[in-house]
Image (cartoon, rainbow, N blue to C red):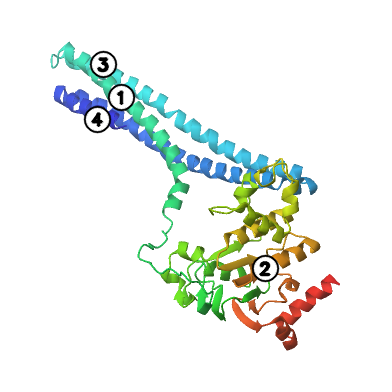
Amino acid sequence: MISAGTQFIGCLIMMFVTEWRMALAAVAVTLAGFLIMALVKLRSQKYFRARQENLSTLNGYIEEMYSGHDVVRLSRANDQVKQTFGGMNAVLYDAEWRSQFLSGIMQPLMTIIGNLGYVVVCVLGSALAMSGEITFGVIVAFILYVRLFTSPLSTLAQGMTQMQTAAAAGDHIFDFLHEEEMSDERGKSAVLTDVKGEVEFEHVRFSYPNNPDKIIIKDFSAHIRPGQKVAIVGPTGAGKTTMVNLLMRFFEINSGSIKIDGVPTSEMSRESVHDLFSMVLQDTWLFEGTVRENLVYNKTGVTDRQLEEACRACGIYHFIETLPRGFDTVLNDSIAISAGQKQLLTIARAMIQGNPMLILDEATSSVDTRTELITQKAMDRLMEHRTSFVIAHRLSTIKNADLILVLKDGDIIEQGTHEQLLARGGFYADLYNSQFEKAS
């Protein structure tokens, strides 16, 4: 487009130098072409944008339905899914053909305008030559000028089409690039070496950045002594997982402070905070690789003996022994592995990481009752001499917690041991008794 623009300007100057009246006539025809092209561009841009948005929506729908195809088939929703896909595809098709049609006529349109420029130059030039104002050579020169003058317009028209496509596709990229950057932490040098595991929440207040008016954590304060097992319970949406995310500095608090061994986490880099914790989440994550690679993920110097001890403690060692190549078996679609076994592997991974503090977010949610007992014993050994935070909906799994924090609507409404909270007959007792009645 730069070279085409340079050629366009150069020809324009030479035409005015040679014969200004013929130059004005050629420019007038060209301006008419630019006007038409601008009108087509304005009309086609919305279709380019609609095409990109509809394509993104359709791809998201396909991915969603593919990942949940078992549910779709069991629910006999095949026809409904196909119908929805057909409607979305029809909208995409409409935007696609309209954008391609309008962009496709731009280049032929510029060719027509270029040929019209030849006609204008020849007619006006002939009239001027017959009156003796110019020579025949000027007409020949202008015919060449018009060709060199209009050919860049075709290049510019094609470039504009490509730029329209790029601009429509770039909207999502620029939305991402315009997101607020994370704060620079190069000046944060606080590092904990001999970690005891004392954690203190002081009047923590938090709301998500995309919805600052909705306060999730209103005024959270708690003091956890080193080595304590802390259970965080409460109804869905009470803020249990949010508290853990704040502790790990996945989000920044609005006000208050979170201290580990007396040092505010805001004075430590995120990497330093993450190095203090091992996490076992409700959603298990295993990648395609060997069992060994999944267990020692990003940790060096792990011996086979340590692997075996951790796997025996979690009750997963027998399953690994039955695999074709033991710890060197590659986990992929050909290996049948249940959700409970995946959960046990992630617990074993946390054992091997050996960080001074531990977070368990519904770590036994995918295991059966018998496996849960094995896992519970393994987690008890894992949590020895470690400050541990356990998020649990099944209250039977946290009876032996040193401290239970009961959250409701972003505030601690009760705290104490299992026996103390039951004796009070408050919100925790109601939760526990309701689960006991359901179990019965």
Does label 1 or label 3 sit earlier along the sequence?
3
Q: Quadrant of residue 111?
A: top left
Q: Which residue is mark 4?
A: 6
Above or below: residue 361 compared with residue 334? below
Does label 2 or label 4 sit earlier along the sequence?
4
As drawn, the label of residue 122 is: 3
4 vs 1, front mark: 4
Residue 139 lies, in percent from the top left, at 21, 15
Q: Which residue is mark 1?
A: 150
Q: Which residue is mark 2?
A: 381
Quarter of the image with the C terminus is bottom right
As shown in the figure, which amino acid type bears the numbered disc 2?
A: Arg
Residue 37 lies, in percent from the top left, at 38, 33
Does label 4 or label 1 sit earlier along the sequence?
4
4 vs 3, front mark: 4
* Residue 70 located left or right of residue 193: right
In this orientation, does residue 395 appear?
Answer: yes
As drawn, the label of residue 244 is: none
Work out how far the residue at label 4 is from the one at label 1, CA to CA, in angstroms.
Answer: 12 Å
